[in-house]
Image (cartoon, coloured by chain):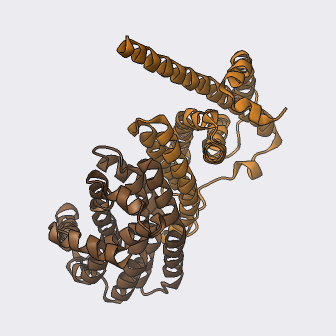
Chain colours: A orange, B brown
Amino acid sequence: MSIWEYANPKKFLSVTTPAVPWLFGAAFACLAVGLIWGFFFTPNAERFQSTVKIIYLHVPSAMMAINVWVMMLVASLVWLVRRHHVSALAAKAAAPVGVVMTLVALITGAIWGQPMWGTWWAWDPRLTSFLILFLFYLGYLALWSAIEDPDTAADLTSVLCIVGSVFAVLSRYAVNFWNQGLHQGASLSVDAAENVSDVYWQPLVICIAGFILLFVALVLLRTGTEIRLRRIRALETRANRAEVVA
Amino acid sequence: MIALLIRDLRLALRAGGGFGLGLSFFLIVVVLVPFGVGAEAAVLARIAPGILWVAALLAALLSLDRIFALDFEDGALPLLATAPVPLEAVALVKALAHWLTTGLPLVVAAPALGVLLQMESGAYGTLIGSLALGTPALSLIGAFGAALTVGVRRGGLLLSLLVLPLYIPTLIFGAEAVRRGAAGLDAGTPLLLLAGITLGCLAALPIATALVLRINLR
């Protein structure tokens, strides 16, 4: 019994198909509890008033935006090393989820920034590196859709994901450098994990759990869809070939 | 390898616009900027380092699709892949040829364009230094992107979407070095980091490029 057994598409589907509704249920339960608790039953913060509550969407989505890319990186490595198709398809399935998470983080950040910093957007290192991450996601998705042969596409996007990861990390620190060179230390970013007090911490953890569950459910569902799509394509090719022979 | 380098350079020269095209593009971008932002010397001097670096980046991007696409179309690339020279070396030579035809002319021409943009006199040294250190990285990263999209028809837009985000660190350190030079500050740190990026790309990217080419030639 090892995790590699699930690299078999049939085994993967037989386990994940019944699990997906449960995962969705758990995700929505967590999100409902976390968001309602967070929005209605926590006090307003002294400096931020009610705007503090966007933290329940902003922080989990931002965390997921980065972690989805890490998951794609791991899946890409598994595909390149062990050639399990499920792994490549999981990376493909995760990318759109990651894009949406990045967008949610950027948009909620802008909505929060407008009343608090007085601007929708500032070229702060964190904001900028998220925008760059968004561009990396777009490039990755574009490469997937541009190449027809599925195995070639999986190989190329995997290499792109690995090289892109190196450059994304590089950009993250380069951006830090660039901003310090431009501005004086205008510390716009608030490190939530360090500053947030217990009242906000508990619903936040539940929300993060909800986002993680939602991501897992979505990726399993989308991977299953990709596997089935590929089966359909294989069946169609076989049918066409049979027609030609007949 | 040397034969391949000479061949690539000769092709770039005789097919027209090898050295000239990237350089003319560089010039045009620089000429367009004053029309866009106004001709005030103070404004131009402030944005000159950034403009010159962004223009260099776009000029390098413009000629990327020629690195592998032509050889892929006429079937020379599979021959190169089966040549006694390892494909990694081919990738390196291709990137070198790209740099010699686009990067090097930019390094030489950039000070003249700096004059057009009213750049501070102290910045010329760092401008040449940063371009000389940074443009090889642009060619190496570009060769990787070109290898990724070699099988895609009309992959130009896709290529820029893939390559430009990878250019960000190079651009940041390059422009920062020139900005510091213009402000009379010490530009050593960004130049060292820029050199680090270039050396890292030099070590790792030809391998990735060759890997991607093998996938595309399968």
| Left or right, B82 with reference to A227 | left
Q: Is residue A138 above or below residue A207?
A: below
- Looking at the picture, how far across and down is residue A37, in whole percent? 75, 26
Which residue is pictured at 14% across the width and 67% down the height? Answer: B16
Residue nearest the viewer, comparing A23 with A148: A148
Residue A55 figure quarter? top right
Residue A192 relative to residue B42: left or right: right
Q: Which residue is pictured at 62% across the width and 38% down the height?
A: A61
Q: Is residue B26 left or right of residue B196?
A: left
Quarter in which the C terminus of chain A is drawn: top left
Residue B99 position within the rendered picture, expressed as x and y whole percent measured from the top left: 34, 73
Q: Nearer the viewer, residue A115 or B85?
A: B85
Look at the picture and state if B212 lies above or below A2. below
In-front residue for pair A138/B210: B210
Q: Locate the N terminus of chain A by quadrant.
A: top right
**Image height of B29 relative to B49, above or below:** above
Residue at point 44% right, 81% down?
B180
Q: Which residue occupies 65% across, 48% down? A: A81
Place of residue A136 in the rendered image (x, y in percent of width and height, measured from the top left): 49, 49
Is residue A177 left or right of B162 when viewed as pictured?
A: right
